[in-house]
Image (cartoon, coloured by chain):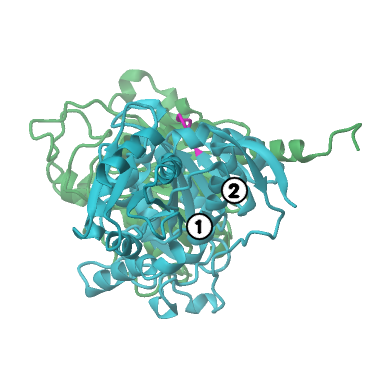
């Protein structure tokens, strides 16, 4: 039996990081994610870990990558404008294949927007925020318990695939308190990055002949290496205008897209015989579940598809859903972002209808129920 | 016996990218001699850089090397250092990289007094992008983005470092090489944030626009316009006008960031007295 606690989502996120073996946090204060930093500033020193509040969001992302290169499991947490600022260094982490976790507690935007209000409008930034082609893994928990477990999973995926992983949730579940169970050590799997077994002389940090995820050596471990944000050869040194760039960037994408089955997780609720499906994540997924119950009580066959992995997008699952339901309803706290992905995968096989809201309140079950009645 | 540079230079990585007449090669060799003198093992040292001509230096040297994003070497280095406080972490940067785009990180690393040896190669220009003015381009001088003469006031890098809290501040030049070796050694030996500005020549994008006939002219300019701090301090202002002091410009004893952090960790991890 684990430990029962009453925690807010941000605190559960910090607990998940600790469970996963995180020993380094760098951050910058920003609403509504600050509690992640505050919690870890208390806890990390107690386990001999490092906490540092940097001078800005950019620096926090840089420090996290530096610590990870030294072998530490590293985390940063931010929101809205801070997430925008981190993007360049996140791209560095993706190209240089540095495991780390970035938490984005979404608030309204653009610009300063609504710092204390919930949002789901960073979801495309999670995918396309940094420049260039790049792999993205992004998880979207919807409950405090899930924030804990998905943060553990985020660390595991970042170690397994040697890439930054984003955990994105909204202000409501970031601040909501729920009962959670923190499992005993060893109950949830905790994974560590594959380190080299070859001699230092033979080691190449980006050796594609070792598979799509080459082993990663820690700085100061005897495996002297060069890491650069320039496109690079397998030995880490820069490459310019060369077919290698094309094949290596394809490998980076492939190590995520080619492992969709391992990475993609979702919950379905009464979806088997559904004629109307709700596609919703985070707090909108919670409203979606309630709306399905209301619809079923009214005799309407509705069901919910709630992705826990939003990137890579569950393409096959949404395509299969579209071919057997009359309509997919997409409630999201934006003016329409993830609906484009749903439409892309539905390929016109069913109606796709959005419910959008950016006034600082969540989409209610009633709003979704009304839309279900409209499209049934 | 001549110094064996090959023991530190990565096989097959030369020639370097620097232009003919660039003085970064002089600094590079000085850095290798300094680290060799201090007998720091290759596995125990990391050299971190941002973006620009100076930032390509780490690629040539057989240490743990990290070429990061523009201006951000110090944050990456901070993550490394705080994770491995017993290792030697150094940053190599340029005037634009360290004091323009990286200015915020620069002052805060100085304020923390984290034990990172920071070497700023000041060539008064953005060389890699073709000669745009930087925070150290002299007022009135020409740059590709100051075609009518620079109107943008300057940073004095050692003053900036001192004011921000660095506990060791020095300045050398690519002309005064034996003195430079000693300055780099002292900068590395110092526990805390040490900032060493090294005056360099960029004949390609700065010198040729600003009436230096050759790279040698720029080196001679360093000779003619610098004074050791000991001499500089003794002269009246009218004798030092237009000249810059070199040497160890400032040092103080101050708590180092990682020491302070891990002392706190030790304190809070100690079981409280009077409790089981």
Side (left or right) of B204 relative to A82: left
Q: Secondary structure at mark 2?
A: helix
Q: Position of residue A195 (x, y in %)?
A: 55, 70
Tell which chain the image draws in cyan.
A
Q: Are marks 1 and 2 on the same chain?
A: yes
Q: Which residue is mark 1?
A: A69
Identity of the residue furthest to the left in this view = B148
Q: Position of residue B100 (x, y in %)?
A: 31, 35
Q: Secondary structure at mark 1?
A: helix
**Magenta: predominant secondary structure element?**
loop
Between residue A318 and residue A370, name the one nearer to us.
A370
Total labels drawn: 2
Between residue A42 and residue A110, name the one nearer to us.
A110
Q: Is residue B66 magenta?
A: no
First to last magenta residue range: A27-32
**Chain letter for the residue marked with disc 2 in the picture:** A
Q: Is residue A31 magenta?
A: yes
Q: Which residue is mark 2?
A: A16
Q: Position of residue B253 (x, y in %)?
A: 62, 32
Disc 1 packing (10 Å; few <14; some 14–19; many ≥20): many
Between residue A250 and residue B99, name the one nearer to us.
A250
**Chain letter for the residue marked with disc 1 in the picture:** A
Tell which chain the image draws in green.
B
Q: Quadrant of residue B261?
A: top right
Q: Is residue B231 something that shows in the picture? A: yes
Residue name at image x 38 percent, y 65 percent? A256
Question: Marks 1 and 2, how far apart in space?
Answer: 21 Å
């Amino acid at each position: 039996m684990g430990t029962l606690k009453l925690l807010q989502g941000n605190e559960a996120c910090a607990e998940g990081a600790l469970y996963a073996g995180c020993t380094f946090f760098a951050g910058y204060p920003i609403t509504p994610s600050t509690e992640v930093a505050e919690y870890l500033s208390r806890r990390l020193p107690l386990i001999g870990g490092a906490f540092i509040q940097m001078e800005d969001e950019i620096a926090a992302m840089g420090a996290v990558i530096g610590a990870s290169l030294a072998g530490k499991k590293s985390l940063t947490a931010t929101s809205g404008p801070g997430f925008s600022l981190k993007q360049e260094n996140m791209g560095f982490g993706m190209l240089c294949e540095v495991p780390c976790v970035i938490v984005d507690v979404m608030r309204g935007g653009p610009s300063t927007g609504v710092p204390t209000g919930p949002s789901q409008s960073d979801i495309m930034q999670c995918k396309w925020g940094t420049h260039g082609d790049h792999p993205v893994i992004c998880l979207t928990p919807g409950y405090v318990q899930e924030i804990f477990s998905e943060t553990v999973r985020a660390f595991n995926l970042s170690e397994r695939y040697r890439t930054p992983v984003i955990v994105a949730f909204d202000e409501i579940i970031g601040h909501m308190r729920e009962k959670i169970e923190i499992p005993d050590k060893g109950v949830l799997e905790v994974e560590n990055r594959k380190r080299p077994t070859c001699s230092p002389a033979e080691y190449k940090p980006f050796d594609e002949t070792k598979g799509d995820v080459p082993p990663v050596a820690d700085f100061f471990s005897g495996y002297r290496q060069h890491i650069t944000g320039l496109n690079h050869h397998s030995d880490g040194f820069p490459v310019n205008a060369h077919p290698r760039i094309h094949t290596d960037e394809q490998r980076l994408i492939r190590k995520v897209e080619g492992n969709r089955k391992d990475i993609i997780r979702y919950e379905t609720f009464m979806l088997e015989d559904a004629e109307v499906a709700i596609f919703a994540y985070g707090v909108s997924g919670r409203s979606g579940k309630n709306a399905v119950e209301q619809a079923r009580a009214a005799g309407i066959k509705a069901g919910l598809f709630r992705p826990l992995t939003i990137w890579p997008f569950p393409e096959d699952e949404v395509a299969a859903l579209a071919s057997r339901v009359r309509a997919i309803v997409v409630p999201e706290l934006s003016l329409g972002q993830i609906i484009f992905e749903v439409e892309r995968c539905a390929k016109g096989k069913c109606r796709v209808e959005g419910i959008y809201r950016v006034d600082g309140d969540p989409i209610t079950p009633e709003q979704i129920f009304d839309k279900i009645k409209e499209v049934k | 016996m001549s110094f064996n540079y090959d023991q530190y230079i990565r096989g097959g990585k030369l020639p370097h990218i620097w232009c003919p007449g660039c003085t970064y090669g002089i600094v590079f060799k000085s850095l290798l001699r300094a680290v060799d003198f201090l007998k720091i093992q290759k596995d125990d040292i990391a050299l971190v850089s941002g973006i620009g001509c100076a930032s390509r230096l780490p690629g040539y040297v057989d240490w743990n090397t990290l070429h990061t994003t523009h201006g951000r070497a110090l944050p990456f280095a901070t993550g490394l250092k705080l994770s491995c406080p017993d290792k030697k972490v150094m940053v190599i940067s340029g005037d634009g990289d360290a004091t323009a785009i990286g200015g915020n990180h620069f002052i805060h690393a100085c304020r923390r007094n984290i034990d990172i040896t920071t070497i700023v190669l000041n060539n008064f220009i953005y060389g890699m992008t073709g000669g745009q003015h930087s925070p150290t381009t002299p007022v009135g001088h020409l740059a590709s983005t100051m075609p009518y003469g620079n109107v943008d006031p300057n940073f004095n890098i050692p003053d900036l470092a001192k004011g921000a809290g660095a506990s060791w501040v020095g300045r050398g030049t690519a002309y005064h090489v034996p003195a430079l070796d000693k300055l780099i050694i002292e900068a590395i030996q110092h526990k805390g944030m040490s900032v060493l500005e090294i005056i360099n020549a960029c004949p390609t994008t700065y010198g040729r626009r600003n009436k230096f006939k050759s790279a040698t002219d720029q080196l001679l300019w360093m000779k003619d316009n610098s004074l050791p701090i000991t001499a500089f301090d003794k002269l009246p202002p009218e004798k030092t006008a237009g000249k810059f002091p070199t040497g160890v410009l400032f040092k103080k004893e101050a708590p180092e960031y990682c020491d302070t952090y891990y002392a706190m960790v030790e304190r809070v991890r100690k079981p409280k007295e009077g409790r089981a």
